[in-house]
């Protein structure tokens, strides 16, 4: 089990979602994103790659941040049709109770964002470039 608490939490949330056999659920996700079901399955299929380790050594350059980007794309934003479906599928409260689904999605995408920011490769050399920014790019005066 991974030690990063956000990583553990993300996979707990993912385990609550219906599996690929619930094609109706994933069709709602696909339609809400304007993509086909195959695309959703292809990207969601990557969740197994990062189950044990958010930055596996045998896959350099790829981290859980890559997968989390798709989670944010698929579930983030104003997608009430997904919220309603999650409310009905996960909480068995009826599709008209989208608030529970919205809360679930907020937790999922917030957790995915924290993991994206934490594990996305960075270029720290860019930070040093700011030390001379005022000299190189002086303000334009009217």
Image: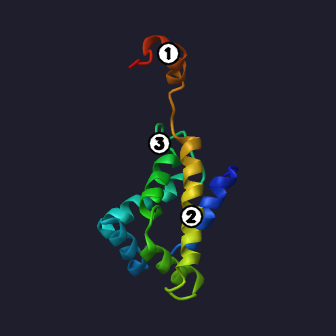
Tell me, yes or no, whether the two marked residues, 2 and 1, touch with CB atoms within 8 Å: no
In the image, residue 119 sits, relative to residue 88, either above or below, namely above
Alpha-carbon span between mark 2 and mark 3: 24 Å
Provide residue 88's location: percent of width, then percent of height.
52, 84
Q: Which residue is mark 3?
A: 62
Q: Residue 139 sits in which quadrant?
A: top left
Q: Residues within 10 Å of mark 2 (few under 14, many from 20)?
A: some
Secondary element at tag 3: loop
Q: Residue at x 48, y 37 (%)?
A: 60
Q: Quadrant of the N terminus?
A: bottom right
Q: Nearer the viewer, residue 81 or 22?
A: 81
Q: Residue at x 46, y 52 (%)?
A: 69
Say which label, 3 or 1, has the lower sequence index.
3
Q: Which residue is mark 2?
A: 106
Q: Is residue 56 visible?
A: no
Q: Which residue is mark 1?
A: 134
Q: Residue at x 53, y 47 (%)?
A: 116
- Residue furthest to the top: 135
Provide residue 108's location: percent of width, then percent of height.
56, 62
Tell me, yes or no, whether the two marked residues, 3 and 1, touch with CB atoms within 8 Å: no
């Amino acid at each position: 089990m991974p030690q990063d608490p956000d990583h553990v939490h993300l996979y707990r949330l993912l385990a609550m979602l219906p599996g690929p056999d619930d094609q109706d659920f994933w069709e709602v996700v696909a339609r809400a994103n304007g993509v086909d079901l195959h695309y959703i399955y292809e990207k969601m299929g990557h969740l197994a790659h990062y189950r044990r380790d958010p930055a596996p050594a045998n896959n350099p350059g790829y981290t859980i941040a890559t997968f989390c980007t798709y989670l944010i794309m698929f579930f983030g934003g104003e997608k009430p049709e997904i919220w309603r479906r999650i409310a009905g599928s996960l909480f068995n409260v009826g599709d008209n109770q989208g608030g529970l689904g919205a809360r679930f999605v907020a937790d999922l995408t917030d957790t995915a964002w924290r993991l994206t920011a934490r594990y996305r490769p960075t270029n720290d050399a860019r930070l040093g470039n700011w030390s001379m920014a005022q000299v190189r790019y002086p303000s334009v005066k009217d």
